[in-house]
Image: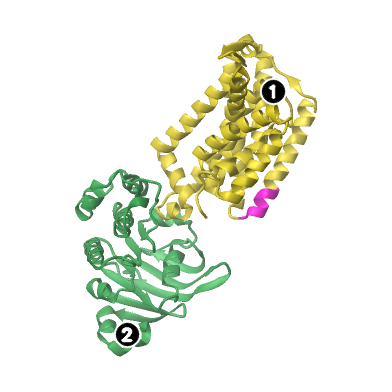
Amino acid sequence: MTDSILTVSNLSASIDGQQVVESVSFAMRPVGVTALLGRNGVGKTSTLRAILGLIERSGDVTIAGERVDREPTHRIVQRGVGYVPEDREVFASLTVAENLRLAERDSSPNRELIAELFPDLTQRAGQLAGTLSGGQQQMVSLARALVNDNRVLLVDEPTKGLAPLIVMDVARALARAAETVPVLLVEQNLQVVRMLAEKAIVLEGGRVVYDGSADYLLGNEALTKELLGVA
Amino acid sequence: MSTIVLLLITGLGLGALYFLVASGLSLIYGLMGVLNFAHGSFLTLGAFAGWELARRLGGESWVTLIASLLLGMVVGAIVAAATEFLLIRRLYNRHIEQVLVTVGLALATVALFDGIWGTDPIYVTAPPWLSQTTEILGARVPNDRFLLIAAAVLVLLAIVAFLRFTRFGLVIRAGVENRSMVTALGIDVRKAFTVVFAIGGAAAGLGGVLASHYFGYVSPQLGGSLLIFAFIVTVIGGLGSLAGAAIASVAVAVLQQFANYFLGGTGDLMVVLLLAVVLLVRPTGILGKKA
C-alpha cells in the first residue's frame, strides 16, 4: 500500500443520519488521473467529502502512508490535498484575485502556472467571482487547487453544466495538472474520462464494484452499461 | 427646524451606540451562525471597567476618558474571546445549546455585576465639554452625541479596513459566505471565530463606556437594554451584514427619536412595527443574503 498516494479503507459516511457511503475501500496510484465513477447518487461526491472530513465519517484514510482520518479538514488539506468541489463554490463576494490569495497556503504559490493555464483570470483579477460565467468560475475553482504544490487533487464534476468548448479547456488544464500531481476525478462526462483517466473505480450502492483499467471499462460497452447505466 | 436637527443628531448618536453593539452581533452571526445573547454583558463589563478607571484617575480629564474607552475595548475583547474559546467553540452547529449557554451567561453575569457593583445606577463624570452643548442650525445639541457618532464612524471604518486589507479579514469575509469551503482550502476557521468575537467584544466594550456617558450612568442592566435594540437592528439590517447594521442602526434610532417626540412617546412601538414590516416585506433584512 505504500506506493499509493491515497488509500481509503472501510470508509463509511452519513449526512443528517442517512448513510451515503458504505465501507468503501480503494487505493489511488501516485501518478495520473484515477476516475471515481458511478450512477447518480451512488456517493461519489460524498466519498470525496468524507476523505476530507467535510461530512461525518468512519474508516481509515491515509495520504502517502499517514493516517489522516482523525484530523480536522484544514489539517488534511495542509498535508497537500487540493479540492475542487462540485458546483465550484467560489466566494461570490470576493474578487478573483482574493479567491486565489485565500487559497494560497505558503509564500511561493504557483502564480505563473495559473497565469499560463487561465490567462482570462489574470485579466479578470479585480472582478467579483460571483459575476463570472460558469466556465470562468470553474477556472477559479481549479486555479485555487493548483495554486499550491499538492500531493493529490480531489476534483468533483469539473465539467458539470459547462459548454463543450469550456469542457475541453477544463480537460486540458486537468491533463496539465496531472503531469505533476495525481488526480482523483469524479466525472459524468465519459469523453473527458477517456481523455484523462488511466484507472477507474466504480461505486454502486455506496460500495466499490470495479477497480481497474479505465480503458478496459470504457472499451467494454456491456460492462460500462451495466456499471454506469450509459455507453 | 431646530427640533428636527436636535432629534436627528440625537438619533444619530443613539444609532451609533446601537451600531457598536450590533456590528459584533452581526459579524458573529454571519460567520458562525451564533446568536450571542451574552453580547450585552461584554458591553456592561466594558462600561464598569471604564467607570472603575475613571473613578481612580478622576473622570473629568480627557486622558481619563480616552484611557477608559481603550480599557473598555480591551476588557470587552478579552472577555468575548474567552467566551468563544471556553464556551461557544464546543457548541458550533448546536444552536439550541448556544442559546441556552449565552442566555445563561447573560443572566449569570448580570447577577455577578449586581453582586459586585450593586443594583443601583452609578452616575459617571466626564470632561465638562461633554456635558455642554453646541448650537447647530438653532438647535443646542449635547456634545456627547458628537463623540458617539465619531466613535461609531471610526469603528465602522476600522472594521471595514480590517476586513478588506488583512488576511484575517479575507478569511472572515469568505467564511461568512461559505465556512466549509474556507476549511477545505486548508484554513483553520476557528481562529477567525475567536478574532471575530474579540472584535465584536471590543466594539461592545467601547459602546459600554460611551453608553455610560450618553445615559449618564452605568448599571448591570445597561447591556441588556441596548441588546434588545441591537438585535432588532441586526435583523433589520440583515444578519451578517455590517453595512446593513450601520444603515439599520441609524434608521431605528432616528425613527425612535422622531416617534417619541411627535407621536407621544411611541418610539419603541414604531421600532417593533418597522421590524414587523421588514420581516414581512424583506425577511432577509435590508442587506441580508437569501438563505
Q: Which residue is most to the bottom?
A: A222
Q: Picture quarter containing residue B47?
A: top right
- Residue A178, compared with residue B150, is above or below; it is below
x, y percent for residue B68: 61, 20
Of all chains, the one bearing label 2 is A
Q: Quadrant of residue A98?
A: top left
Q: Nearer the viewer, residue B210 or B111?
A: B210
Q: Is residue B119 left or right of residue B194?
A: right
Residue at mark 1 shares a chain with residue at mark 2: no
Q: Which residues lie in the magenta part? A: B94-100
CA gap, disc 1 and disc 2: 76 Å
Q: Nearer the viewer, mark 1 or mark 2?
A: 1
* Chain designation of label 1: B
The residue tagged with tag 1: helix, strand or loop? helix
Question: Which residue is denoted by mark 1 in the rendering?
Answer: B215
Residue A169 falls left or right of residue B165? left
Q: Please tell me which residue lies in front, A5 or A146.
A: A146
Chain A: colour as depicted: green
Residue B96 highlighted magenta (yes or no)? yes
Which amino acid type is shown beneath numbered disc 1?
Phe
Depth order, front residue of B2/B267: B2
- Chain given the colour yellow: B
Residue, x 62% and y 33% (percent of image)?
B255
Question: Residue B217 at what x, y percent from top left?
Answer: 72, 22
Return the residue at label 2. A224
Q: Is residue B45 above or below residue A149?
A: above
